[in-house]
């Protein structure tokens, strides 16, 4: 159990890739709407399988301005020679834009 300024959370202090995948699956099953995982959770799932994180950051991606902001953030990422990473970015853009 984690304690922060008097607040106790049953969330483990570190989430590994398997736990993140499980949580993301449950979110997909239980929350309505379209959500984007960002931060350390995204890195652990897509880029660095051995990475852990302390929390998961989700952003709603439908609605006023969300799509534009997410696409603008994708446009700021540095170019990469990694074909797999380019393909993941393209899939993410397609998910966000519905294309």
Image (cartoon, helix red, strand yellow):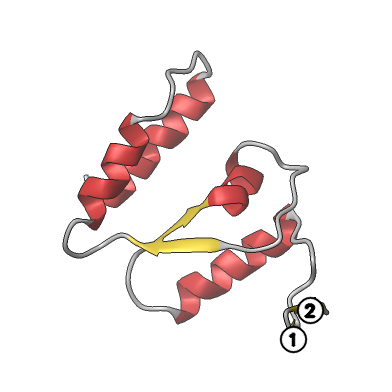
Q: Can residue 33 be seen in this view?
A: yes
In the image, residue 91 above or below residue 22: above
Comparing labels 2 and 1, the label whose residue is closer to the camera:
1
Between 71 and 7, the residue placed more toward the observer is: 7
Percent position (x, y) of residue 9? 73, 82
Percent position (x, y) of residue 64? 16, 62
Relative side of 56 to 99, left or right: right
Between 83 and 66, the residue placed more toward the observer is: 66
Q: Which residue is drawn at 75% across and 51% down?
A: 52
Relative side of 43 to 30, left or right: right
Within-10-Å neighbours for mark 1: few <14, some 14–19, many 20+: few
Within-10-Å neighbours for mark 2: few <14, some 14–19, many 20+: few
- The residue that mark 2 highlights is 3
Mark 1, secondary structure of its residue = loop
C-beta proximity under 8 Å, tags 2 and 1: yes
Q: Which residue is drawn at 38% across and 39% down?
A: 91
- Looking at this view, name the residue that lies furthest to the left: 64
- The residue that mark 1 highlights is 6
Quarter of the picture containing the C terminus is top left
Quarter of the picture containing the N terminus is bottom right
Q: Is residue 98 visible?
A: no
Q: What label sits on residue 21 in the rendered view? A: none
Q: How far apart are marks 2 and 1 (CA)?
A: 6 Å
Query: Image quarter for residue 87?
Result: top left
């Amino acid at each position: 159990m984690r304690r922060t300024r008097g607040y106790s959370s049953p969330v483990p202090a570190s989430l590994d890739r398997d736990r993140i995948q499980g949580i993301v699956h449950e979110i997909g099953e239980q929350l309505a709407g379209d959500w984007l995982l960002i931060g350390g959770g995204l890195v652990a799932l897509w880029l660095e399988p051995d990475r852990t994180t302390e929390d998961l950051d989700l952003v709603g991606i439908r609605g006023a301005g969300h799509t534009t902001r997410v696409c603008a953030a994708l446009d700021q990422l540095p170019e990469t020679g990694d074909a797999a990473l380019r393909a993941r970015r393209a899939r993410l853009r397609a998910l966000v834009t519905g294309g």
